[in-house]
Image (cartoon, grey):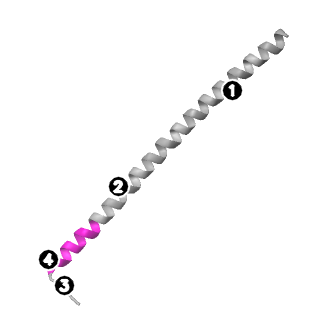
Amino acid sequence: MSFPKGVRKVTQLHSCLIKVQWWTLKFVVKQNINAIFMEWIKSREQDDAILSLVKKDNARIDAFV
């Protein structure tokens, strides 16, 4: 079954647009995942910093007592 040239071009353009949309969606999702992961790492680093401060304070208190 053969389509007129115009229909074939529109179909090719449509499939190309779908690929571009899919690539854009993957890129956006990947960026969001990276941003969430970086925020998580930052919060973990802050938690670690707070924990180390608490440990130092506990060590000082133990040394004082």
Assess disc 3: are there few (<14), some (14-19) or many (≥20) residues with their C-alpha within 10 Å of its C-alpha. few
Given contact means CB atoms under 8 Å apart, are the residues at marks 3 and 1 in contact?
no
Q: Is residue 47 above or below residue 17?
A: above
Name the secondary structure under disc 3: loop
Name the secondary structure under disc 2: helix
Mark earlier in primary sequence (3, 1)? 3
Q: Can you identify the residue that label 1 sits on?
A: 51
Amino acid bearing label 2: Thr
Residue 22 percent across, percent down from the top left: 36, 61
Q: Can you identify the residue that label 2 sits on?
A: 24
Residue 32 percent across, percent down from the top left: 44, 46
Amino acid bearing label 1: Leu
By secondary structure, the bulk of the magenta-drawn segment is best described as helix
Q: Can you identify the residue that label 3 sits on?
A: 3
| Residue 7 appears left or right of 55 | left
Assess disc 2: are there few (<14), some (14-19) or many (≥20) residues with their C-alpha within 10 Å of its C-alpha. few
Q: CA distance from mark 3 to mark 2?
A: 30 Å
